[in-house]
Structures are given as structure tokens and as C-alpha cells.
Image (cartoon, helix red, strand yellow):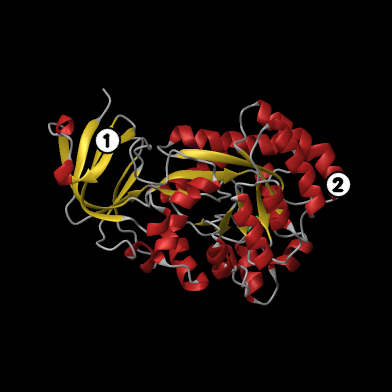
Amino acid sequence: MAQRYVISGAKVATLADDANGYDLREGAAIVVLGDKIAWVGPESDLPSEYAGLESHDHAGRLITPSLIDCHTHIVHGGNRAQEFALRLTGASYEEIARAGGGIVSTVAATRGASADELLASALPRVDALIAQGVGTVEIKSGYGLDTETELKMLRVARTLGQARPIRVMTSFLGAHAVPAGAEADAYIDDVCLPTLEAAHAEGLVDAVDGFCEGIAFDAAQIARVFDRARALGLPVKLHAEQLSHIGGTALAAEYGALSADHVEYATEADAAALAKAGTVAVLLPGAFYTVHETQAPPVQAFRDHGVAMAVGTDWNPGSSPLGSLLLAMNMACTLFRMTPAEALAGTTRNAARALGLTDSGVIAAGMRADLAIWDVSDPAELSYGIGINPLHHRIFEGTI
Ligand code: DI6
Ligand code: FE
């Protein structure tokens, strides 16, 4: 039987109004029918047709949309604790990558792991996110760089969404690094594009991503991947301007990408281009922190131009072993000077946009009943705490 109930007494941050921060409503009620939100409004205005429904009183708590982690690499083999130690002695992320460490070392570990092993190592990561109120997680491939392993990663990502109460959105990241011994253009033509076709044919791809960087692929190479995505009718997104400025953000805007991610080195002109294209800037403070980056993304330019900003963990074994989206929100505030309201919009409304989702990220009638109920009185507390998890419980597709 489909669930039907009213949540009452709570403070609700709907995030539904772009111009109005949290859109915080005191003494609000939410009606859940099945897997959807049927009604939101002041308790005193509850329509009589819902008056007899079972009611859950949450006086003193805060309700937000479930959080959305719109950028992760949580399916991977091995770890890179040794690289962490190396960086502390002065080696940079780029130097380690050029010396054969970095992404390609995780590629070896991921190729060597079975699908069952990848699933077993990814499940606790998903569970950690769920425990923090996450209802949707994006997961990228990109540690295979051959057809077999890229497909293996994407199948594991899909399996995670069946094994746990969380929605998984996949991104094909075949253009993540040039495999050892290969040449970039030949890799794109001979491996990346055919693998994208195969993954799409199997229904494994929700979006197509790339790494546009000096240590990875240039804009012309990424454009060839985006052209194929377009031909297949798939949306695109891009790791752009993370370590240097080489034109990824402009390319993302030109292709109408869902998001441009990292964007530390993006310029004012890039911000204008993102705004015009409606592309979300996804900020990833975990990577900024881990690789000892010093250039923060141009948050004020994004504000000035009206670029929507999202926040993700970038959870990966190298540049961001960050397993907490709440901590990412805290870091976005302290390291990038986002406001707590921007950080929460960045893990709800704008994170949904970065994934092309129109059915979640805000609390409104008709949206999925994906909600997080918190033991906090002020929504800023979600960003303010460091390593604190105030989740009371989560509702996923209407199920408590
Ligand atoms: N940028 C990142 O932050 C991750 N991928 C990317 O293109 C890092 C991946 C890694 O270091 O393993
Ligand atoms: Fe990433």
C-alpha cells in the first residue's frame, strides 16, 4: 500500500525560491502521497482532504530536501594513502601524476578488482552518504580507460542504486586520463568513443564527463567526446580549470553543459559564458584542500553573473578522499566564502540542476518525497558544524 501521511510542526527549508535563500517556513506541513510530495504549506491551511491522514510531528526540527552529491568517483579500487604522504613532503598532485602515480595508479587497482570487490568497497561509501541525508548521488567511471573496466564500473554504479535506497546518476568519464603507453588522440578515437557507444547501448550512461587539463585532455580532444555525446542525445559536464586555465569552461558553456566542475581558474569571462549557457558551476572544496590549491574559484564573479553554484564531495582516492557532503558544505563556506544558504542550495536545488534533474532538490508539490529531517534549529548549522552529523532521519521516495 502506498504511504500517505502528513509531516507537521517543522521548520521547512524548501529551497524552492531562487531569490529567497532557504525559503524558510515555520510551522509548516508537508503531505506525502506515495513517492511524491502532494502539498506544502502552513499547518493551519492543511486542506481538509488530508486532515485525517497519519501525522508525524517534528516540532523543533528542520526539514530540507534530501541532499544530492552531484560529483563523486566512489567506485574505484585501492587507495592512494602513499600519495598523500608524498604530497606532505612537497610533491605536487601534478608531479605525482606525471611520474605515473595519480589517476593511472587507481586505474591499475580498478582493473584488477572484480565487480563484486568494487561493489563491496563502494557500499560503505554509499552508506556513509545516506547516513548524512543524501538521496541522490552521481557516480563517474574513468578508472578503467578500457572498455571492459569502464563498463564494469558503470554496472557497479547501477547496482549500488538497486542495493540501497538511493538514486544513482552515472557519468561516463572515459576521457579522465591518458592510459600508460597510449597517445591521447588515438585513445579518444580507438577506446573512449567506442566505449561510450557500448556503455550507452547498455543504458549505463546518464551524462558524459571529461577532464580538461594539462595532465589529461585538451579542449579539442574533449570536444570530440562531446560531439559524440550530442549525437547520442546525452548531456555533458566537464572537469574544467581545476589546476590551470586551458579553456574547458568556455567549451562546457559552448556545448550547453549541465555543469562545469572545479573551476578554480575560471575567469570573469568564463562566469559570463556559464551564466549565458545556464551551466552550473560545481565547487569541490575537498579537492582544493587535498591538493593544497591556493587559487579559490571566482565565487563573487559567479554571483555577479548569476551562475548557479553547486557543491559536491568529489569523493575519489586521490585528490579528494572526502566522505562527507556536510563537511564539503562547511569547506565551501570557510575556504570559498560561500554563505551557508548558498552551500545548502548547492547540495539541493543547484545539485539537481547539475544532474539535469527537475524532480528533486526542492520541497514543492509534485516533487519526489526525498527529504532530510535534522536535529537543528537554524539551517546554517548544517554548514557550521565540522564533522558533526545532525541527521534525525531521511525519507526516500516517501519511505521513512
Ligand atoms: N579531477 C579530480 O579531482 C578527480 N578527477 C579529476 O579529473 C581526481 C581523480 C584522482 O586523482 O584519482
Ligand atoms: Fe572529479
**Considering the numbered disc 2 on the image, is that residue within a helix, a strand or a loop?**
helix
Depth check: give the residue in front, 25 or 343.
Answer: 25
Q: Is residue 264 visible?
A: yes
Residue 336 at x, y = what percent? Answer: 52, 70
Q: Which mark is residue 324?
A: none
Query: Circle 1 sits on which residue?
Result: 32
Q: Which mark is residue 185?
A: 2
What residue is drawn where x is 78% and y is 53%? 219
Within-10-Å neighbours for mark 1: few <14, some 14–19, many 20+:
many
> Which amino acid does the dot numbered 1 rest on?
Val
Dot placed on the residue nearer the N-terminal end, 1 or 2: 1
- Left or right, residue 391 beside residue 318: left
Residue 26 to residue 337: above or below: above
> Which amino acid does the dot numbered 2 rest on?
Asp
Q: State which mark lies toward you, 1 or 2.
A: 1
Residue 148 to residue 62: above or below: above
Q: Is residue 114 visible?
A: no
What residue is drawn where x is 32% and y is 65%? 381
Residue 167 to residue 17: above or below: above
What residue is drawn where x is 43% and y is 54%? 18
